[in-house]
């Protein structure tokens, strides 16, 4: 299945000046995660994250609709984002969205793909809710405390550190994590 | 119809009508009604038989039709019905005889004549067809179809000029031509023009084109034909204009470019430097004119050489890598027949890799930053390039780097599988393909490829499980869908896997399956003989008939036939047939152990199959119930295969006769392939048909006197003659013929095989061909198996010499050497394996 393409050539070539090298344009598109391409998501996660995700994770991914997406660069699958909805404490009409994974293969970083995915998630979270469904009020996630790049990325998109979770990743040498949040709606 | 009172006569007319309208049950009742009063009325009996036939009661059908004929030998209806019965049994020969008989009693019966002509064209009795069609035309000259059919008959007979005459006469009888373009008339006119073209006078064909143009719907055909005729007549300026016009309609048609080149006096090969400059200039113009045409960009690579080649190729490959075109290598490798071009491409793309690694562009200018996918596709290209050169290590290095770069791309794992396959590791290749498959479960192509690799690794169970993911799921045994869909690649690969595992019966079953598919294709054309005439799709019809005539030269048939012949020959040599390749050369104890292991596996598979069958039966019964129950049909569907092992084939009386049946179509259609005659020799020499074996050898010599296997067959031919001669079974007349041709086979050599073989070794020693060494070693061994083993081994081990044999020492050839040693029961097999393992570290055959 070919995902809908977004032409990035205008945004990337806009910065070109006389002495800077010219970037070649490329196509970016988001695609659904389906039982048929789940293998690609698994492969991505194995390469991108040190955590091994349980089968249940992949089952849930198929059910969150627009909150789990694969991103294509020139028709090649190079990244993914997976979220899950969680009930907000003490409220039946509100819920939180937890960003479990968001990553792009190393050669394809710094091309705006992560932002593209995050933008999509924010848009979806801000959509008016169907009557009777709880509405999303908060996005949150965890970042390993030494991951400067990720911290900067999320801060740039309006997330704030709300908590330091000690020994959040007991299996790693750097086991502490920051919790980041962004209020929506 | 005869001898019936008017009431019954009317009824009889009615049942004839019922047959035409396919109301078989009603017709059957009517026939019974007549027979109650006139139980011996022949024509009614025959009709009753015909209805039985359509009600699926074949035996009763023949019984009644024959009874009918007995009671009325001179009725054309009875004979016609008998013919129809044979036709529905696909026994065309007998059917034609019956029709001919029927025509004796009713010479001008249109229906019978038509039916007869259909059989004649189906059996390619073209003279008969033309005759019958002439009679029909005389009877019904007002009908267009009858004119056209005669013309087609003449064309197929190779007399297009007579066909033209027929059509011209017909067209002259037409008073008012259709005022608006009429498709059928248009096709008729174009067909007429095609006949003129085949008759070879292009000027006449061109003139004719002008006269019919206004009435033809297929404008493109007119334009293409005109351009072609201009070119053939040497009217180059007009040809050029015509091709330019065609290009404006479709700037990606390779043929149009070629035509344009020719009309500019620029042939396809052996061009001068001047021509090259001109043709490249032409393409430059065309690229400007048609910037979106891929053909205009790709074709210059074919014509350019030297510096110019590097320039155009550089541009072309860069743009493709940038775009990310997965098929780029497949497209480029066709240029590799020219080794200078291959080297140039390699240099270019290796250069890109260095530049991309260092400065993210295809060169070091720093002017452009390529997308990360450019590096990915470059690595992918290089992996395939070095795989083609069989430089496994390099190829694996590039493909692994690509996978590390982008581990989600299906193509990369497929390429890796291919590299491993070429390196001889079928199991690892299969694993790579399965990884690819799991990345995209809805991709039918990769699923199919993966299945094929599983079969190559002789993993039948997984192959079946994988392939049925894409077959119909709603039938009791989804594997049967592969047969219904005529999935030949599967039968072929599975059959070859069966052969490797010593399951000759199963293998033959699959090869016969392929043969049946080809029979079906031939059958399938039957309806088109009437349909196409009615619809006037004559050009397409004739090209179909010609295709059908060549059908069995299709690579799938050729391969299946070769495999089947080998199986039958093996059955003849070893009638118990149960020895697999693995078992050759084992000790008795090892064989016993191996066999019991195989039996256990088979038992287990059988149990699983039983279980599956039960389950399938249950589901089938369920669906039948739901569908309102045709229980009988469901039961029939579940009954399944009564001879899964194919013992019918392994126990056949005359394996060589069966082998011949596969060979015969090849002798007709693949007469120029040496393999056909090499196979023929293998069969005839075993049947002790020395003259036919001689004929096969003479044909082979004509095609390639230097062929490696041919030499070994020549040696065996002499041995067969000597054996026959000492057994006193060699007829003098046969010997005389062989003596007459002796020098064609053996030159100046007499019966001294040792000298003949020594001459061969001397003659081929500078060829550096492993195949010839094997043939020589086999010959040494065959001439004197008791004494010459050491000499034969020594010959085979000469292949070690890198300098002499580096070029032809492919994996396939090295495996052949190993098999030859095994055939000798040589003690040096392990020694060979060890050496081969160094040359091909991935190959499982040497582990």
Image (cartoon, coloured by chain):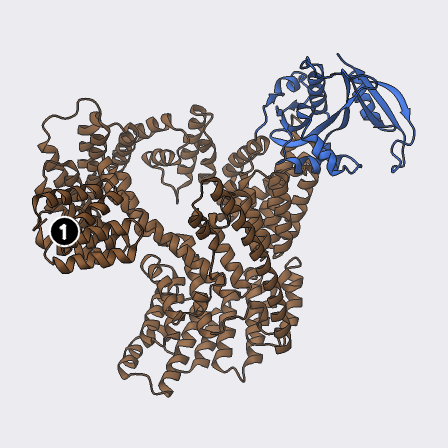
Instruction: Give the image location of residue B750, x and y in percent.
Output: 38, 81
**Residue positioned 52% across, 50% down in the render:** B617
Q: From what the image shows, is residue B453 above or below residue B540?
A: below
Q: From what the image shows, is residue B221 above or below residue B474?
A: above
The part of the image, by quadrant, that contains residue B10 is: top left
Question: Which part of the image, by quadrant, shows the C terminus of chain B?
Answer: bottom right
Residue extending furthest toward the front: B37
Front position in the image: B56 or B200: B56
**Left or right position of A19 against A158:** left
**Left or right position of B812 against B683:** right
Q: Please, what secondary structure does the residue beneath circle 1 have?
A: helix
Instruction: Give the image location of residue B417, x and y in percent.
Output: 61, 49
Residue extending furthest toward the right: A166
Q: Chain B colour?
A: brown
Front position in the image: B684 or B272: B684
Q: From what the image shows, is residue B385 above or below residue B295?
A: below
Classify 10 Å Cα crowding around label 1: few (below 14), some (14-19), many (20 and above).
few
**Residue positioned 53% across, 33% down in the render:** B316
Q: Is residue B391 visible?
A: no
The part of the image, by quadrant, that contains residue B529 is: top left
Instruction: Give the image location of residue B595, x and y in percent.
Output: 60, 70
Q: Chain A colour?
A: blue
Front position in the image: B770 or B212: B212
Instruction: Give the image location of residue B271, x and y in percent.
Output: 39, 42
Residue under label 1: B37
**Residue positioned 69% across, 18% down in the render:** A124
**Residue positioned 62% across, 77% down in the render:** B587
To which chain does the residue with label 1 belong? B
Q: Is residue B434 visible?
A: yes
Q: From what the image shows, is residue A44 above or below residue B577?
A: above
**Left or right position of B674 against B47:** right
């Amino acid at each position: 299945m070919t995902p809908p393409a977004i032409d990035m050539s205008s945004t990337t070539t806009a910065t070109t000046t006389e002495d800077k090298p010219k970037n070649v344009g490329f196509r970016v598109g988001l695609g659904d995660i389906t039982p048929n391409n789940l293998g690609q998501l698994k492969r991505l996660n194995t390469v991108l994250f040190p955590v091994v995700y349980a089968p249940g994770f992949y089952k849930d991914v198929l059910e969150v609709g627009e909150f789990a997406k694969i991103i294509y660069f020139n028709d090649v699958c190079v990244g993914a984002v997976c979220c899950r909805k969680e009930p907000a404490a003490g409220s039946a009409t509100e819920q939180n969205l937890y960003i479990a994974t968001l990553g792009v293969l190393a050669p394809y970083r710094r091309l705006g793909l992560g932002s593209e995915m995050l933008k999509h998630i924010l848009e979806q979270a801000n959509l008016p809710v169907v009557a009777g469904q709880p509405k999303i009020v908060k996005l949150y996630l965890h970042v390993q405390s030494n991951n400067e790049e990720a911290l900067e990325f999320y801060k740039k998109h309006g997330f704030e550190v709300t908590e330091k979770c000690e020994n959040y990743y007991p299996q790693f040498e750097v086991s502490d994590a920051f919790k980041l949040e962004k209020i929506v709606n | 119809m005869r001898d019936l009172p008017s009431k019954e006569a009317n009824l009889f007319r009615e049942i004839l009508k019922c047959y035409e309208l396919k109301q078989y049950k009603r017709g059957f009742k009517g026939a019974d009604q007549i027979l109650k009063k006139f139980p011996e009325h022949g024509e009614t009996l025959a009709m009753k038989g015909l209805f039985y036939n359509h009600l699926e009661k074949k035996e009763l059908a023949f019984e009644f039709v024959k009874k009918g004929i007995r009671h009325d030998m001179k009725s054309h209806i009875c004979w016609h019905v008998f013919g129809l019965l044979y036709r529905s049994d696909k026994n065309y020969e007998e059917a034609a005889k019956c029709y001919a008989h029927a025509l004796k009693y009713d010479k001008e019966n249109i229906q019978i004549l038509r039916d007869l002509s259909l059989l004649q064209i189906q059996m390619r009795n073209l003279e008969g067809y033309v005759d019958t069609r002439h009679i029909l035309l005389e009877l019904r000259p007002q009908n267009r179809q009858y004119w056209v059919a005669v013309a087609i008959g003449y064309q197929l007979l190779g007399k297009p000029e007579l066909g033209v005459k027929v059509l011209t006469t017909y067209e002259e009888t037409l008073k008012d031509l259709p005022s608006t373009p009429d498709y059928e008339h248009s096709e008729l006119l174009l067909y007429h023009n095609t006949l003129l073209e085949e008759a070879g006078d292009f000027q006449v064909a061109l003139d004719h084109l002008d006269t019919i143009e206004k009435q033809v719907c297929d404008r493109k055909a007119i334009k293409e034909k005109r351009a072609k005729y201009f070119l053939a007549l040497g009217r180059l300026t007009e040809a050029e204009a015509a091709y330019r016009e065609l290009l404006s309609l479709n700037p990606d048609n390779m043929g149009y470019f070629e035509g344009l080149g020719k009309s500019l006096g620029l042939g396809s090969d052996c061009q001068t430097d001047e021509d090259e400059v001109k043709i490249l200039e032409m393409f430059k113009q065309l690229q400007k004119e048609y910037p979106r045409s891929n053909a205009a960009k790709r074709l210059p690579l074919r014509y350019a050489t030297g510096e110019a080649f590097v320039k155009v190729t550089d541009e072309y490959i860069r743009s493709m890598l940038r775009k990310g075109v997965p098929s780029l290598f497949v497209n480029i490798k066709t240029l590799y027949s020219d080794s200078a071009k291959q080297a140039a491409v390699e240099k270019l793309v290796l250069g890109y890799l260095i530049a991309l690694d260092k400065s993210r562009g295809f060169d070091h200018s720093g002017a452009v930053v390529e997308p990360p996918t450019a590096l990915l596709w470059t690595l992918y290209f290089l992996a395939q390039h070095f795989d083609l050169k069989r430089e496994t290590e390099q190829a694996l290095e590039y493909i692994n780097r690509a996978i590390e770069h982008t581990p989600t791309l299906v193509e990369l794992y497929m390429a890796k599988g291919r590299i491993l396959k070429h390196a001889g590791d079928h199991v690892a290749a299969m694993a790579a393909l399965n990884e690819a498959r799991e990345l995209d479960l809805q991709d039918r192509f990769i699923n199919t490829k993966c299945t094929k690799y599983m079969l190559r690794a002789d993993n039948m169970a997984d192959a079946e499980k994988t392939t049925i993911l894409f077959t119909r799921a709603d039938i009791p045994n989804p594997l049967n869908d592969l047969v219904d869909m005529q999935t030949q690649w599967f039968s072929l690969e599975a059959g070859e896997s069966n052969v490797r595992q010593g399951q000759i019966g199963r293998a033959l079953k699959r090869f016969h399956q392929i043969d049946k598919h080809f029979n079906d294709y031939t059958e399938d054309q039957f309806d088109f003989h009437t349909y196409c005439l009615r619809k006037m799709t004559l050009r397409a019809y004739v090209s179909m008939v010609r295709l059908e005539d060549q059908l069995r030269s299709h690579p799938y048939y050729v391969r299946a036939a070769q495999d089947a012949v080998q199986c039958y020959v093996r059955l003849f040599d070893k009638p118990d047939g149960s020895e697999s390749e693995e078992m050759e050369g084992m000790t008795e104890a090892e064989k016993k152990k191996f066999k019991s292991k195989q039996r256990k596996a088979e038992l287990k598979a059988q149990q699983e199959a039983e279980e599956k069958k039960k389950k399938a039966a249950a589901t089938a019964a369920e669906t039948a119930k739901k569908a309102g129950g045709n229980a009988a049909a469901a039961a029939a569907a579940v009954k399944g295969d009564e001879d899964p092992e194919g013992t019918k084939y392994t126990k056949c009386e005359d394996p060589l006769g069966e082998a011949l049946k596969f060979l015969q179509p090849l002798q007709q259609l693949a007469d120029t392939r040496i393999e056909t005659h090499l196979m023929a020799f293998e069969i005839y020499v075993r049947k002790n048909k020395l003259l036919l074996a001689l004929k096969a050898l003479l044909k082979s010599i004509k095609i390639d006197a230097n062929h490696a296997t041919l030499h070994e067959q020549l040696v065996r031919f002499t041995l067969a003659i000597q054996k026959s001669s000492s057994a006193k079974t060699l007829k003098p007349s046969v010997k005389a013929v062989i003596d007459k041709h002796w020098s064609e086979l053996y030159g100046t050599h007499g019966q001294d095989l040792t000298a003949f073989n020594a001459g061969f070794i001397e003659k081929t020693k500078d060829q550096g061909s492993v195949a010839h060494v094997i043939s020589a070693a086999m010959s040494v061994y065959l001439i004197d198996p008791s004494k010459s083993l050491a000499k034969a081994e020594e010959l085979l081990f000469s292949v070690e010499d890198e300098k002499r044999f580096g070029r032809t020492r492919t994996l396939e050839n090295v495996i052949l050497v190993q098999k030859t040693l095994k055939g000798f029961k040589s003690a040096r097999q392990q020694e060979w394996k060890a050496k081969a393992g160094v040359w091909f570290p991935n190959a499982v055959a040497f582990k």
